[in-house]
Structure formats: C-alpha cells, structure tokens
C-alpha cells in the first residue's frame, strides 16, 4: 500500500445517501459455473428493481475484464486479484447506497470470503445511525447448476472450447470450483425458471428491509 496517504471523509453519511434513494445499499454476489445463469438472473433482477424505482448496478465478470481487469488472466493469482478489485468496487458502490449485482464465477471460497469480510468491516465501521445490524452488506447467492446442464446451455461456446483444450484454467474442467458452504441463497437454475429465481430474490430483499 502507498504511504503518506490519508482517508478523506465525506460530509454526507451513508444513511443520508440511502435515505435519498429510499433503499439499503447491499452487494448480491452471484457465484457459480459458467452457464449456470448468473448474468441472466442479474439482468432479470435489475429490471425488476428498476421497475420498483430502485437504484442498482450490475458488475459482470466479462464486462469488468474489458477495462478494470483487462490486464489479468485466469490463473489462480490473477483470479484472486480480479476478485479483490471487484470487492473494492462493490464496497464503494454499497457505501453509496446502491444495490450491487455482482456476477462472477469466483471459484475460490477464500476470495469470496475476503470480499464478505471487506464489506462486513464497512458495516461495522459505518454510521451509528444505521442500527439495523440484521441487514448484511454482502449476500452470497449460489447459482447452482450441474456441469451437464451448463455444458448443454453453453451460451458462449466456452465449455466446448475448454473440452477441446482450447481454453486453459477453465472452471469445472481444468480448474476447480469451490461451492459455497453457507450462502444466503441457493438458486438451482436446473430446476427453477428465471421468473421463480427473480421472485425469490425480490422476496429476500423485501423481507430483509433493503427496498425501503
């Protein structure tokens, strides 16, 4: 970390921004294999939130690698740095009061836990006025689908190329995926429709007090 730097605090508190938006800032972290439906669910949830006049933003794994993380590959070290950077972005957006929808394979449990710890620290160090400690800053959503289903969908043709040896370090074939042990939500897209999953997500946010 650079030295001789000092954090400059805003005159506005997080609660002020959330009050203006009439919502609670939070990051929903969608993890799962390629083709499981992470981006599809994020887009569906984004539309539903927008229809309910909520401010939200999608951070998608492929999109981020076009800019912020364009210098990174897919080896273990680069994957770790990719998630670290995204975690910092999620932390800022959540503090701004947005409902962040992060769609990343994020195959390693330790990397996901690091993002959770970062956002949890933000919650603990945040405004005392935000007294509802039941609400979380980080909600892990396991988008579950078996390898066979993901191979059949293969919307980007990645599984076919990976099985042919054209893509190295591909999660589910030549690289591991560590499934979440205690996610807040598990959405099995092999069994549930996009509409059913979106409804479940909206109910979770409503019941948790994030939408008002």
Image: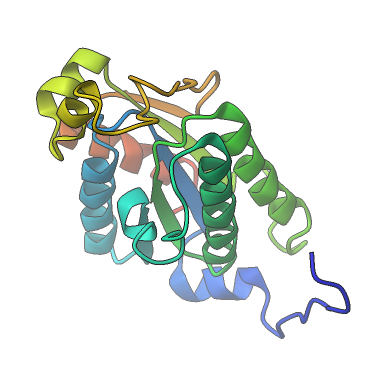
Q: Is residue 131 left or right of residue 77?
A: right
Residue 3: x percent and y percent? 86, 73
The residue shown at (21%, 48%) is: 44
| Residue that extends furthest to the right in the rendered view of this protein | 4
| For residue 186, above or below residue 13 | above
- Counting every numbered tag in the picture gives 0
| For residue 72, above or below residue 199 | below
| For residue 107, above or below residue 134 | above
Q: Quadrant of residue 127?
A: bottom right
The residue shown at (35%, 31%) is: 168
Q: Quadrant of residue 161?
A: top left
Quarter occupied by the C terminus: bottom left
Q: Which residue is at the front of the view, 167 or 144?
A: 167
| For residue 93, above or below residue 10 | above
Q: Which residue is at the front of the view, 111 or 1?
A: 1
The residue shown at (77%, 81%) is: 8
Q: Is residue 81 left or right of residue 44?
A: right
Residue 80: x percent and y percent? 57, 42
Q: Is residue 191 visible?
A: no
Q: Is residue 209 left or right of residue 122?
A: left
Residue 190: x percent and y percent? 20, 19
The residue shown at (70%, 53%) is: 123
Q: Which residue is at the front of the view, 17 or 152?
A: 152
Residue 19: x percent and y percent? 53, 71
Q: Which residue is at the front of the view, 170 or 166?
A: 166
Q: Is residue 140 visible?
A: yes
Quarter occupied by the N terminus: bottom right
| Residue that extends furthest to the front in the rendered view of this protein | 165
Colour logic: rainbow
């Amino acid at each position: 970390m650079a030295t001789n730097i000092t954090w400059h605090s805003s005159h506005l508190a997080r609660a002020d921004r959330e009050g203006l938006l009439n919502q609670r800032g939070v990051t929903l972290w969608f993890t799962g294999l390629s083709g499981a439906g992470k981006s599809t669910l994020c887009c569906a949830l984004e539309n539903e939130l927008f229809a309910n006049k909520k401010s939200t933003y999608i951070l998608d794994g492929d999109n981020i690698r076009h800019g912020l993380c364009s210098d990174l590959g897919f080896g273990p070290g680069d994957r770790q740095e990719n998630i670290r950077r995204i975690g910092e972005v999620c932390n800022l957006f959540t503090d701004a009061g947005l409902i962040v929808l992060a769609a990343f394979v994020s195959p390693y449990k330790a990397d996901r836990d690091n993002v959770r710890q970062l956002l949890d620290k933000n919650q603990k160090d945040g405004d005392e006025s935000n007294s509802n400690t039941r609400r979380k800053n980080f909600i892990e959503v396991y988008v579950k689908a078996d390898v066979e289903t993901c191979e059949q969908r293969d919307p980007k043709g990645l599984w076919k190329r990976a099985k042919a040896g054209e893509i190295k370090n591909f999660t589910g074939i030549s690289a591991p995926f560590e499934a979440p042990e205690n996610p807040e939500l598990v959405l099995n897209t092999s069994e549930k429709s996009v509409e059913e999953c979106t409804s479940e997500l909206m109910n979770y946010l409503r019941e948790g007090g994030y939408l008002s």
